[in-house]
Amino acid sequence: MKILCIGRNYAEHIAELKNEVPDEPVIFLKPDTALLQRNQPFFYPDFTQDIHHEVELVLRVSKNGRHIEEKFAHTYFDAIGLGLDLTARDLQSKLKSKGLPWELAKGFDGSAPLSNTFKDVSEFADLKNINFRLDVNGETRQQGNSGLMLHDFSKIISYVSRFITLKMGDLIFTGTPSGVGPIRVGDRLEGYLENEKLLDLHVK
């Protein structure tokens, strides 16, 4: 199982980080050791002082495929959940300034908390109108809608599969909306898909 992540997929998030708007999806990966499941707590590591939350819709790949056409891409995932792309922003900035890969800032242990529950795609009336949000200590920090993505689910599936074979059970983090910010020890992060809480994370 692999974790594929899409960067810079919401215009307002691109703007808040002062990044360039990409012509094609930005892809990076996390190792399976990044997964944090069953609402286990996240323990703040000692190699960073500035971890940011990034809430995302997550697709669960349901069958193997490569070179998938966009018109068939919707048949390659069967469920949608929530995830957090926890990012060591200070480490990422340092690596980017040197022109180096920034996997260490994205792929460290526990950097991909994942919802216990995934919702079957049949439960959504419109895959281009899915609301989600992240609350930190009871305050809404991020709100997103799948319709605001620069590259929708089908484009993501098709594009990724040109380079990397998708396999059943793979997870695709589809990008984060604006509102990213730091987390602190003692914080509680709650993720909602529509109005259902799917993710509950304590920072220790």
Image (cartoon, rainbow, N blue to C red):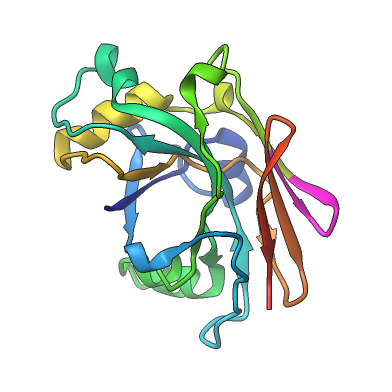
Q: Is residue 150 visible?
A: yes
What stretch of residues is rendered in magenta? 133-141
**Percent x, y for residue 11?**
56, 34
Q: Against 177, is 108 above or below?
A: below
Quarter of the rendering containing residue 203? bottom right
Q: As drawn, is 5 to the left or to the right of 55?
A: left
Q: Is residue 170 above or below residue 195?
A: below
* Closer-to-camera residue (36/105): 36
Whether residue 136 appears in magenta in the rendering, the answer is: yes
**Residue at point 55% right, 42% down?**
117
Q: How many badges with numbers are in the image?
A: 0
Q: Residue at x 38, y 38 (%)?
A: 60
Residue 83: x and y, percent? Answer: 53, 49
Q: Image height check: is 53 above or below 91?
A: above
Q: Quadrant of residue 173?
A: top left
- Residue 202 is situated, as x and y percent measured from the top left of the image, at 70, 68
Left or right of residue 94: residue 52: right
The residue shown at (37%, 68%) is 33
* Residue 48 locus on image (x, y percent): 55, 81
Query: Magenta span has 60?
Result: no
Query: Which residue sits at x=72%, y=58%?
Result: 189
Q: Quadrant of the C terminus?
A: bottom right
Q: Is residue 128 above or below residue 168?
A: above
Q: Is residue 127 visible?
A: no
